[in-house]
Structure formats: C-alpha cells, structure tokens
Image (cartoon, coloured by chain):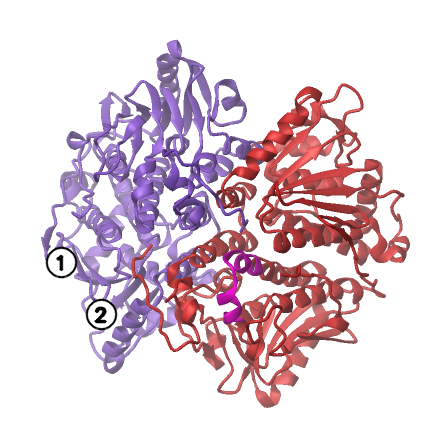
Chain colours: A purple, B red
Amino acid sequence: MDPIRFDTQPADYRHWKLNVEGNVARLAMDIPEDGGMVPGYVLKLNSYDLGVDIELADAIQRLRFEHPEVRTLVVTSGKDRIFCSGANIYMLGSSSHAFKVNFCKFTNETRLYLEDLSENTGVRTIAALNGTCSGGGYELAMACEHIILQDDGNSAVSLPEVPLLGVLPGTGGLTRLVDKRKVRRDLADAFSTVAEGVRGKRAVQWGLVDQIAPKSKFSAAVDSAVEKLNADATERSGPGIKLDHLDPKRDGDTTTYRHVTLSVDTGKRVATLDVRAPTEPPPTSADELHQRGSDAWALRVWRELDHALLDLRFNHPTVGLIVIKSAGDASHVIASDNALSKLSDSDWLAKEVVLHMRRVLKRLDLSARTIFGVIEPGSCFAGSLYELIAAADRTFMLDAEDDGPQLQLSDLNFGRLEMSNGLTRLQTRFLANPEKVDELREVREPIDTEAALDHGLITFAPDDIDWDDEVRIAIEERAAFSPDALTGMEASLRFAGPETLETKIFARLSAWQNWIFQRPNAVGKTGALTTYGTPERPTFDYNRT
Amino acid sequence: MDPIRFDTQPADYRHWKLNVEGNVARLAMDIPEDGGMVPGYVLKLNSYDLGVDIELADAIQRLRFEHPEVRTLVVTSGKDRIFCSGANIYMLGSSSHAFKVNFCKFTNETRLYLEDLSENTGVRTIAALNGTCSGGGYELAMACEHIILQDDGNSAVSLPEVPLLGVLPGTGGLTRLVDKRKVRRDLADAFSTVAEGVRGKRAVQWGLVDQIAPKSKFSAAVDSAVEKLNADATERSGPGIKLDHLDPKRDGDTTTYRHVTLSVDTGKRVATLDVRAPTEPPPTSADELHQRGSDAWALRVWRELDHALLDLRFNHPTVGLIVIKSAGDASHVIASDNALSKLSDSDWLAKEVVLHMRRVLKRLDLSARTIFGVIEPGSCFAGSLYELIAAADRTFMLDAEDDGPQLQLSDLNFGRLEMSNGLTRLQTRFLANPEKVDELREVREPIDTEAALDHGLITFAPDDIDWDDEVRIAIEERAAFSPDALTGMEASLRFAGPETLETKIFARLSAWQNWIFQRPNAVGKTGALTTYGTPERPTFDYNRT
C-alpha cells in the first residue's frame, strides 16, 4: 500500500468546502461517494474515512494561521437532509485493528484541535446541523461550542453505535455527552441506545443540542448565532501567513526535512528522530516573525515533527521505539523560546506557534510507541526541545569526562506547553515534590550530566565506557517486549495527576473502544460490525465482562 | 462448576493467618500449594487466586466490625524469603476472559477496601515485606500506607508483568506507582520492565518502598513502625460486633435473604433484586445499635446486597441486566438513615455501617451489568435506598392515578455515600446544574412521580396503560444488545466529573488490561501468558496499536 499522506491544502480538498467571508468561515462537508482513501467502500450519506479527517485537520490549522480575521467557524454540510452519518462502517469493518485504533486517535485529536481553536485561539465554533447527524457526525458536532439542529420532523442527532454496531461512540462521544455537555447520565444512557436518535424539542430538553430552528428559519438562526458569538470572539489582526508544504526528501528509510530527520530501521523496529536547532538567531519582533512566516524555525520544526509522528503512526506500524536525538546550538533554541514567550501575549502568530508546539507534544505523548531520549555531546535539548526529553519514557545522557552534553530550561518548560492532563511535563514529573519545579525555575544556565541526574531531569547517565552497550541493550530489550503490554503500560504511566476531558477520552473511552474492537461480538464472523448491512443478524456471546 | 462462595470466617481461612494482639493485627499470607479454588494449578511461592482474595476481603471486613481495638494492621507473609509472587499465572492462563476480568476487579476492590480501612476507619496499615514481592504482591503492598522491605541482598519488589507475561500490573499497580506513590514516570517505566525488580537502597531512592531493614533488624523495624503509626491511629472503643453468616435460602433461581431476594431469569438474562425496608423502627442510640449488631437492618441489608452482587458477578455471567425493586415502609428507611447520620460522628459502629453501604454502592456502580430501577406502588426507595435508583442506568416510575409510588431523600443522599469519583450520586447526576442539589436538600417530604420527573430524579414515568409494555420492551431491548458495547458504554457514562485514583484504576488501567487480556500477544497460542513456564518463548505480532 502507498504510504498515507498528510499534506493537503484547500484547493485539493475533495470532502470539504472551506469558504471564508469577512470574519466568518464556513466549512461544509460534502463527501463524494467514490472519495474513499482506499478502494472497497462507498462514502454514502456523508460518512467519513481518514481522508476526510485529514482535510478537516488541515482546514482547522489553516484557519489558525492563514485566516486570523476569522472570528466564527460554522461547521455544516453541503448536502441536503444529511449533516453526517459518522465513520463509514464498511471502512471500519474492513480495517485492521491497528488501523481502526489509529484512525480513531487521529479523529479524536482533530476534534480536540477544534476545541483548542475555540478555547485558546478564541475562534467561536458552531455546528449547523442542516440534516440528520449520527454517530461520529454528532461527536464532531459536540466538539463545537454551539449546536443548532434543524427542526423538520426528520433531522435527529443520534449515537447508534451500541444498538446497531456493537461498538461505542468512541471518538469522544460518550465522554463529551456526560463530561462536556453534562447530559444527565440516565438520559445519556437512553439516548445512546436509541438508534433513531432524538430530535426537536426533546433534543434541547435533554441538552443534546443548544438550539433548534425550523427549516425555513434555519439559515437565519445560524446567522444570528454567528452574530452573537462573533461579538465574543478574540480579535486577531491579519494578514495571515501561508503554511507552505513541507516536501521532505525520502531516501529509502530516511526522510529528511529541513530541521528533522526520521530514520526507520524496520528490522530492529526502531526509528530515530533527529531534531536540529536553528542555525540563526530567531525573529525578535512580531514583524520579523510574520515576515518569516512558515519559514520560522519554531513553526517549521514542530510541523516537521508532527508530520514525522503521523508518518510513523500510520506508515510504520511495527516500529515500537522512537529514539529522539538533537544537534545544534542550544542558545538559538533558548533565544527562540524567549522571543516567542515574550511575543505571544501580544502577537497572535507567536501565540499560535506555541499552541502548535503544544499540540505536537501532545501527539507525541499519545504515541503508542516507546520514546527514548538520547542526549549526546553536541545535542541541543534546551527549552521547548527539552520537552521531548520530558515526554520520553526513559532518557540516557552521556556522562563524559570533557565536553559532555548539556540541558537547559526556558520559560516554556514552566507553562504554555501543558500536557493533556493540564500540567506541564515538569509538574507531572515532580508530582511527588512540586517544590522541585520552583527550584528548577531559577536554574537557567546550561545543566551538565551530573546536575541533570541530581535534578531528576534525566533517567540514566552512563559513562563513556558503558554508554554504547547500555543504550543498545535498553533499545533491544524494549523492542522485544509485547507491544500491547507496552502500549498499556506507557498509557498508564505517562499521565499521572489530574484527569481532563482530553485524558478521559484517550484513556477511558479509547481503551474501552479498543477492547471492544477486539471482541468477537463486534468483529467476529457474526459480530455486529461484521454483519452490519448484510442480511445476517449478529449473534452474541452474552457473557458479561 | 459449583457456584463460588464468598462467605468465610477466620477459622476457615486456608491462606491467611489473622492474629490480633492488643491493638495490632497481623495478617500473614501463607498459601498452601494445593489450596487453589479449582483444580489445575499449584499455588507456589505464595501466588494467589480468587480464594485467597476472598479471605483477605473477609479479614479486612472483620477487622472493621469485630476488632475496633485494632489501630495498626501489618500485612506480611508466613513464609520465609517470599512475601508474595502475585496472581498465579497458570490460574490466569487457564481462566476465561470474563473470569480474569472479574477476578481482577474483585482484587482491585479488596485493595481499595484496605485503603478505605486506613483513610476512613483510621486503622494504619503496614506492608512488612519479609521476602521477595512481585506483581500482584507488590500491588497489594502499595495498597498499604507504609512499606518496609527486608534488605538481605535478595528480597526485591518487582512488577514483572510486562517483561515476563505480556500483560500489565493491572490490579492497581501502574496507577498506584505514579498516582499514589508518585514515582517519577521514567523510573516507573524502568522499574516496570525489569523482571528481577529493585531492592535495597535503590528501592527507597526510587520511592518504591518507604523503608528497608536488614534481616536481623527487620522484625524490630516493623515493631517500631507499628508503634509510630499506632500513635496516629483513630481510637475506636470496643467491643466489636460479630458478623454472622448470611445463610440465604436457595430455591432454584431464587435466593432469599432476610431483606433481599435475588431472582435470576437465565433465559431472559435478567435478574431482579428485591430489597425490603425494615419492619421495625431503627436503633436510635449507639447502645441499641451495638446490641443489634449484625442484625441491624442497615448493616444486614447491605451485606445481603453485596453478597447478591458478587453471586451475580461470578455465578451468573450471562445475566446482563439487574432490575432493582423495593418494598416496605419508607419511613423506617428514613428513620434508619437519620439515626446513622446522627450517630456516625460519635459512634464507630454507625460510621462503619455507613462506610459499608458506600462500598456496596460502589460495587454496584462497578457492576458490568445494566441496572434498571423500577419504582412501583409499595416501594420504599427512600434515602440510602434511593441511591440504588441513582446508581441505575435508567429508571421507570409508575405514574398512577391514585396511591402511586413515592421517593424520599435523607441526609445520606447528600454526603457519606460518595461514588468512586468523590461526588455524591446526586452531584454526579446534576453536574450541569449543581444548584439542583441544593434545591433538593430542602425537599424532605415524599416525592410523587410527577415531582420526581420534574426534579430529574427518575428517567421515565409511564402511566398505567403504558407501564407493562414500556418496562418489558426496555428490558428486552437492553438484554439483546452487545454485552461488550454495553459494558463500555455504562463504564463511560456512569462516572462523569472528577477522576480519582479509584476511577483511574477501574477505568484506565482495567480497560487497558482487559484489552491486553484479549490480545493474541498475551493469550494466543504463542502469547506470553500462554507460553509462560513452558519451554516455548512467546512470539509477538509487533504491530503497535
């Protein structure tokens, strides 16, 4: 199979129409039936596959960077009578377990990006449901701030996964229902088992939508909601910057970006991510930052990392371990962090660059791969790049006699790059002794290996004699363990501390869905997902677990 | 197979020795190799099965009620050089998926009961690790407040599940490591992949144990820790009360307790739990309560409910739906609640009775079965018994012309019976409008169907004409859905709001473990759990998910 590509742009969209008029953007889903990413299924009734979500993620990203003038985003459908019928069942039925899980994870991330757009960028979001909205369609709607449902005696919202498919509304659905929209649990229970869903006034009464409007007044109701939300949106002064294509060079198992190199060793099931510091000083004024646009190192390097992570996730499923290394002048990284930190209170682009960093780091935290940080002489794990080390499951730093590697911290290690649990990686790391974080706040000079070990910033510090063997053996051992046990272990150890909507979605809900995606009652020969759309009815093993 | 029995008493223990001297209890694990609950495996090296945990749960319960004089509990081993080697692998390997999951859930509950004993009853707990302690053994140790490890060059703590078995330390292990003991995540990662574990000073440095002591001084170290903790324990004045056997009458599919009847309809996969109010006024003084002892309705009825829930969980795995009904004089229930509420600040037994209620209700919340509450004329869902309705996934209350059913609230609905998420069921129910809870606090008179619907205390209120059909159809529909999808859905909808160590264990960790327990890499022909202890090495499908 050809590798899945994550680069796109509005002119190439097949599934969405992005239309910006003044300070309102409309994103209309209009999926061609033959628009599936791979052959074998028909995307009827605005049902989606990964290709549809890749475009949605791109559109949200471009609104942030290319259209700062937008104050409200309306997510709607380009088809009559149907908003979206959710993930395509035949696509799910014909996909491998690993693909299903990764597809859901990407969809979850994209919906959280929509919420990040409203919560942190200040673009207000409206789901304008001009037709029936079921399953993943309603999960998408719930990721918007305000839901308007057409009241035409037919259009309903529904989560038919349990009654029809024997799986969960697992891309945020159940969690958003009771935790975001705070729908009463017994009503949520009833709603999630009624295949035909709920419409009209009851949908409002139960808290499933915020507003209904008859067909004749639907468009006016949306306009008036836009007007109202627009008033509270965050002012971002244009013009935007253009996000250019990354166009990495691929050479065998090596993908070379401008600031990142991804090398995959399929035999050893290990990938190495090499990150390079900027070679020149950062932009220090908002003007300069806007001029550099998507060439600014801090934006470019994290876009490249994001791209590499998605490439690993979807195109290299057997790689179990990511080794992260870095090279370059740490002082440039610190200078870039400082400039962004200073500018991001007043300049929207600087703020967006940091928000983007945060999302990429979250994607790394959520990678179902082991992450090892390897800190060698010449590396530049400083400030924002130290977050890669803090995100690692384990780190090795060479304890050299002379010219050993150093770490360094910046303001960005103490705020703005929070994990899904709402804490910084340092706060999570030092849950047992929070005063350690305050202590480190004062340490701004470069930190050598011994001090890094003392501070608890790294895990192991082998000397020259042990280094090669210790790192090699750790990598080999890790790559030999059960990949499933590692996934479960890493997901459990990475997110100590408070839980949020986000961690609940990825931990509780996804874990249950992954379990169900393995069960014969869903994916066996007579399972509900397998028999859906055939004349067969599913047969279940009724043992409750 | 004979049904699994949950009744036991110290004289019948085969696996533990409970020894109370003064205000110190010692609970020593000493498992006979031939003590397995079913044939087919040998309980070597203090490895345990469900039978061992049933005794542990009983011992903790009896310490609460029968030994109020105990201030400190020492959990240790009766064997030399070995504390506990965890759950028996051959037992796990030969068990069904459903049994594995239910076994882990019971083990988790029992460990939380140990924590409840120290946090809420005030009995201090010490794990005295007089030998090697691995897997579930270390998970048990972590459920104690203070861990002392023998420093003899050999005794280690370890979580070898990932490297040796391809599964997780899934009975609280990973969660307690980073969330309770707040072990740094990279150290936790290293620890959880080193099969031989960590011993001596490093175990203290990493935060895995609180104290080490050489063999010659081990017993003295434990004594001195006991002395220290004893000083901070809660004073509870004796004598205790004797927990008598419940001895229900079994007649075909009906089990009749004094205040509860459990009827199982295996064909329909539905069980009915009928709960009866007390027939006489409650004890109103501490003396009276102590005199009634385990005959007090409020203790007895919840012990019976607990017993019935365990019976359903283990002995009726295909029953997917529990219908909860009640009958009797609601005013007696309210009077009992009021008396307990008043007494529990000053009397340890009243407090224990309420803590016990809370644990049983939590066990109900965690039942992987649908719960429907059915409220008919003559029912007594008042106060603490209303919690059964609040715990239900959906409730039906008859809207009768005359003499319809009523609900009523007591102080216990507003505190002391919190769910695992730390909130009351009413707080969880009304997350969207917390002021509703304050409003209800003032409503103490009986609440009829219309008012109950208005207040949001019930889900549906069919009238006489619709009642039979509506309830019957809802039950039939529910019982026909995929049991796995229902389990995942219910687990997701029941626990909105904050997460705690407890919900993290049951949601995140258990869900991952359940997923792994299905995976060929663990339980397939060449999976790690299957091949453990054989000459074969496991072979893995290395796709990461």
Residue density around tag 2, few if under 14, some if 14–19, many if 20 or more, within 10 Å: many
Residue A61 image offset from top left, x and y in percent? 25, 37
Q: Secondary structure at mark 2?
A: loop
Q: Classify mark 1: helix, strand or loop.
A: strand
Q: Which residues are magenta?
A: B88-104
Q: Check disc 1 and give the amino acid type.
A: Thr
Label 1 neighbourhood size at 10 Å, few (<14), some (14-19), many (20+)? some
The residue depicted at 30 percent of the width and 34 percent of the height is A48
Q: Which mark is residue A459?
A: none
Q: Which chain letter matches label 2? A: A
Q: Would residue B138 be seen by someone viewing this image from the given angle?
A: yes
Asked whether residue A171 appears in the rendered view, the answer is no
Q: Residue at x 51, y 37 (%)?
A: A178
Q: Which residue is mark 1?
A: A254
- The residue beneath circle 2 is A376
Q: How many marks?
A: 2
Q: Is residue A472 left or right of residue A183?
A: left
Instruction: From the top left corner, tell me how far across and down residue A481 is, in percent.
Output: 34, 67
Question: Amino acid type of disc 2?
Answer: Glu
| Magenta-span inclusion, residue B184 | no
Relative to B429, is B61 above or below?
A: below
Horizontal relation, residue B194 to residue B130: left or right = left
